[in-house]
Image (cartoon, grey):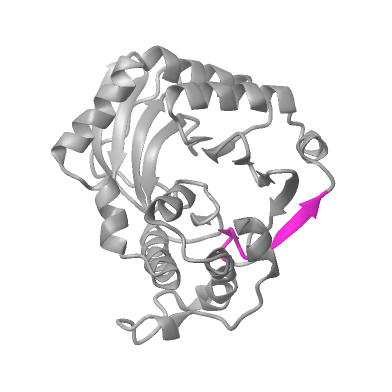
Amino acid sequence: MAIVLAMGVASGPIGASDCKECAHFPVPRAEAEFDVLMEVPRGFASGGKPSLEQVLANLMPYGILDLEITGRATHDEISTLKNYYFGSVCRILDVDPTRLNAQFNCGAGCVEARRDMIRRNLTAWSEVANAFRAAVGVRLVGAWGAPEIYRVNDVIKFGKQTVVAKPSPVMGFIPGGVFAPQPGLAAALSERGINLDQVENLLMTMNEAGAIAARYRPTGALEVILIGVADNLSGILFLREGESPPKAKAEHENGSRYVLIEKLAENAYFFETR
């Protein structure tokens, strides 16, 4: 329902004027596109007040309500925009952001539980990595609602509908408030050199491991995500042969920084960012 609603909503923009703390929009060149972007959470809200669990699920990395910034932007700009967007979404959906944040930032015990979950099931997570590498043409999968709702690169499957998320022209926002309907999932993937059977096999391995997203980093490393919200991530990083792991406080391209890197196996590292 969220995609259908987001595609059809045309109410007034929400931008800098919606921020009670900000005298000016934090990244001025992004303001006009940010206003269009707000159509997505407004469309989600038009279906009725969602539960905290529904909002959290759709804010997961590369979910319908998550924000990816693919255009030219500094690390600080990405961090600022993602957190500003997170606050705006919470206002639109009437959700307390501290309650959402607490689902991730819930203390040392939560970090240990996430790490132990991956360590105990390392074989399953390695199978995700193998299936991802075998899926030719796939660079990113958001499997937060698989098998009914998921994203492969810029293609989104929503039940029987398939759409392509169009990035905004300047900031490269995805979602950018614009979705192009497609005649079918297999055809949309095929146009991009992607095989549906390989995608379905990948989704199956992700579901078995408990992964909600996977993507190639700019370095070539493969990142498989267990959970995330805004610019916070937790998961496992599979490095290429000979590649060094990122250091603590190193920048992550989603606007966060690495706060924990722990070796689980050769070329496999548990990580968290904030």
Residue visible at 40% across and 64% down?
77
Residue 186 image point, x, y percent: 79, 34
Residue 230 in the figure: left or right of residue 102: right
Position of 234 relative to 54 (above/below): above
Q: Count the marks.
A: 0
Q: Nearer the viewer, residue 177 or 149?
A: 149
Q: Is residue 274 visible?
A: no
Q: Nearer the viewer, residue 173 or 143?
A: 143
Residue 27 image point, x, y percent: 44, 74
Give, as a single range, the part of the protein colored magenta.
171-182
Asked where in the image residue 177 lies, by quadrant, the reply is bottom right
Residue 91 image point, x, y percent: 39, 72
Residue 3 in the figure: left or right of residue 50: right
Q: Assign the N terminus to one quadrant of the image.
A: bottom right
Residue 36 in the figure: left or right of residue 223: right
Q: Is residue 3 visible?
A: yes
Q: Nearer the viewer, residue 229 or 11?
A: 11
Taking the magenta stretch, the answer to whether it contains residue 213 is no
Residue 232 in the figure: left or right of residue 152: left
Residue visible at 61% across and 80% down?
11
Residue at the limit of the structure toward the left, as seen here: 108
Q: Nearer the viewer, residue 66 or 173?
A: 66
Asked where in the image residue 188 lies, by quadrant, the reply is top right
Taking the magenta stretch, the answer to whether it contains residue 177 is yes
Residue visible at 54% across and 40% down?
145
Position of 270 relative to 2 (above/below): above
Residue 108 image point, x, y percent: 14, 38
Position of 116 relative to 230 (above/below): above
Residue visible at 30% across and 28% down?
270
